[in-house]
């Protein structure tokens, strides 16, 4: 079951981090720390060496106790950067939860 309050708190924390394209280095270490705390194995590529990229990508894996081939593997991908304009975001949660 999803802990809705924890989900909301995490969203509110992350959405307030200025991380527009090219400035992902502000959010990347925070995400890395959260993924490690979840028990994921986190590796970084060398994307930040590219002049237009703001941070290394994070590649996270999770060990499984299920035998190889018993269930299909799952791959998720996401962006760390946010859509412009996304600086100084001040989210508001109203009484109805929205």
Image (cartoon, rainbow, N blue to C red):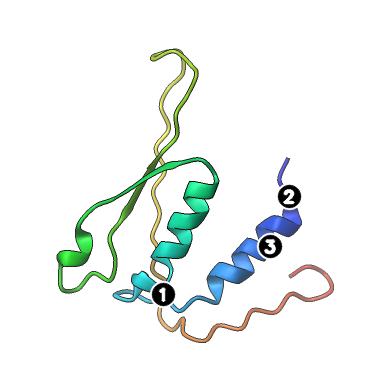
Farthest-out residue, bottom: 88
Quadrant of res 53: bottom left
According to the picture, the residue beneath numbered tag 1 turns out to be: 19
* Residue 58 image position (x, y, % from top left): 34, 52
> What is the spatial separation of the Cα atoms under label 1 and label 2, in whole angstroms?
26 Å
According to the picture, the residue beneath numbered tag 3 turns out to be: 8
Above or below 62: residue 49: below
Which residue shows up at 54% across the image and 68% down it? 14
Secondary structure of residue under mark 2: loop
According to the picture, the residue beneath numbered tag 2 turns out to be: 3
Which residue shows up at 38% across the image and 60% down it? 79
Instruction: Name the quarter where the N terminus is drawn.
Output: top right
Which residue shows up at 48% across the image and 56% down it? 33
> What is the spatial separation of the Cα atoms under label 3 and label 2, in whole angstroms?
9 Å
* Residue 72 image position (x, y, % from top left): 42, 22
Above or below 71: residue 1: below
Classify 10 Å Cα crowding around label 3: few (below 14), some (14-19), many (20 and above): few
Which residue shows up at 35% across the image and 71% down it? 25
Quadrant of res 94: bottom right
> What is the spatial separation of the Cα atoms under label 1 and label 3, in whole angstroms?
19 Å
Count of numbered badges drawn on the protein: 3
In primary-sequence order, the first of circles 3 and 2 is 2
Secondary structure of residue under mark 1: loop
Above or below 92: residue 81: above
């Amino acid at each position: 079951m999803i802990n809705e309050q924890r989900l909301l708190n995490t969203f509110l924390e992350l959405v307030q981090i200025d991380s527009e394209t090219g400035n992902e280095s502000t959010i990347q270490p925070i995400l890395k720390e959260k993924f490690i705390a979840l028990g994921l194995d986190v590796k970084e590529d060398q994307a930040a060496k590219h002049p237009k990229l703001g941070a290394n990508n994070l590649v996270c894996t999770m060990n499984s106790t299920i035998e190889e081939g018993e269930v299909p593997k799952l791959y998720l991908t996401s962006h760390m950067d946010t859509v412009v304009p996304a600086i100084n975001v001040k989210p508001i949660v109203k009484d109805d939860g929205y």
